[in-house]
Amino acid sequence: MTRNLILVVDDDASLRRVLKMQLEEAGYGVALAANGEEALARIDELQPKLVITDLRMPGAGGMDLLRHIRERHHETTVIIITAFGTVETAVEAMKSGAYDYVTKPIDYDALVLVVHRAMERQNLLEEVRKLRSALDAKYGFESIVGRSKPLLRVLEMASRVAQRDSTVLIHGETGTGKELLARAIHANSRRREGAFVTINCGAIPKELMESELFGFTRGAFTGAQAAKAGRVEMADGGTLFLDEVGELPLELQVKLLRLLQQGEIEKLGSTARAVVDVRVIAATHRNLAAMVEDGTFREDLYYRLSVVPLELPPLRERPDDIPELVQHVFSRVKERHGLAQLRMDGALLPYFAAWRWPGNVRELENVIERMVVLSAGEEIGVEDLGENMRRVEPARGSIVLELPAEGISLEGVEKDLLWRALERSGWNQTQAARYLDISRRTLIYRMEKYGLRKEGQTG
């Protein structure tokens, strides 16, 4: 897909020229097509990131073009141009996958704003897709499933920093997936062919930490009959992951600082320094800034480590991700145990949504695995939850749809969601649109489509 290239499709030559000029002034590359048939060929050839197309054209119209893009170029964003009288058709186009629409006569400032938003969304999704591809290919994805805004912000920053050699400090509670994120950064970096070496600074006794980290020479201490490379040396040319770096003793913090500042290490029992090429990613669940104030963590090391700080949100701050995460983990766990026919009762989701998850994703994985392993029938339900979780009042805000065998009206569900969002926001359209993650224009036309008005309000 060509970065920031827009294909403009319209049978009006003068409008094509004006759109090209306006979009090029805004910094975008622009290609043109006079009709749907020409556009189909140009899309296959140019792979544009965004297509702006008139809805009504001779031959293949905008809807035909949209269907083609959805089938063969689903990563391309489409914006529809329509006359005011055909707005309902534009709404149908959005239901079919268009990002947004603009009406004629075109407000060019508004169009550029819509294009900017569409491009930002595309760029974010592309960066996240790259990072997720790296995760999926090598490490699985249980700990970073979800599309909530807090998570997407972290993944977008991680995908950017992956391309650089900057030191990264990942902060997050136990079980949030700090090591998995560190591995993904390494796998998406220029060091991907090098080693990813991890050391847990809180799991190794203090007296062994220096030799484990920096290695030792023969005779450095009793029993050192041969020299041994440390974890830093093993990571030469790759990435060193320091898990729970807040547990590193003060006397070793000085040596880690030398590594970050000068790329040098000194083995235990040696006076000579060795040069290494290592990228450092550190992680902690502790408040290092507070530790600096307490004098238990060096201030200069703290600033060296936190060149790019990343904060992984706890699961309780990602409630929107819980249904997707539950389904993902459940599918993987039952497959691993050869229980492909096992089902999960939808009544469980409100309990999962209400639980605070102090152990985060790791705890959720353990809960689901225990339920799967101990299941006696073909479905796990509320009775299979642990006693503590069963005592929690289930979340009433969770949307749990029971799909009837005879079918369900999608328009009815959409109308009900719109009504609830408007009621929730006191019929403030801006707030309701933000809550539903759609534009205010889209909300207004959907309100008109379903005849939604506040009680006592007239047209």
Image: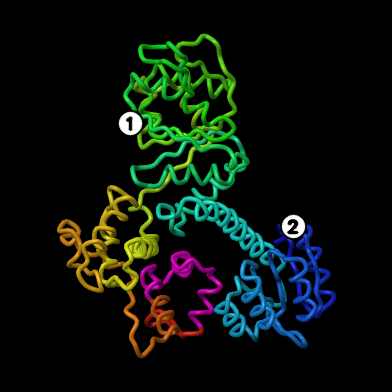
The part of the image, by quadrant, that contains residue 432 is bottom left
Report if residue 348 lies within the magenta region. Answer: no
> Considering the image in quadrants, where does the N terminus appear?
bottom right
Question: Residue 276 location, x and y as percent?
Answer: 58, 24
Q: Disc 2 residue type?
A: Ala
Q: Which mark is residue 26?
A: 2
Q: Is residue 274 left or right of residue 436?
A: right
Q: Residue furthest bottom?
A: 406
Question: Residue 131 location, x and y as percent?
Answer: 55, 52
Establish if 432 lies above or below 291.
below
Residue receiving disc 1:
203
Q: Which residues are magenta?
A: 420-448
Q: Earlier in the sequence, mark 1 or mark 2?
A: 2
Q: Is residue 426 left or right of residue 353?
A: right
Establish if 362 lies above or below 305.
below
The part of the image, by quadrant, that contains residue 7 is bottom right
Tally of numbered discs = 2
| Other-residue count near label 2 (Cα within 10 Å), few / some / many at <14 / 14–19 / ≥20 | some
Question: Residue 166 location, x and y as percent?
Answer: 58, 34
Q: Residue furthest top?
A: 271
Q: Which mark is residue 405?
A: none
Residue 220 or residue 323, whichever sits in front:
220
Residue 185 or residue 428, whichever sits in front:
185
Type of secondary structure dominating the magenta stretch: helix
Mark 1 falls on what kind of element? loop
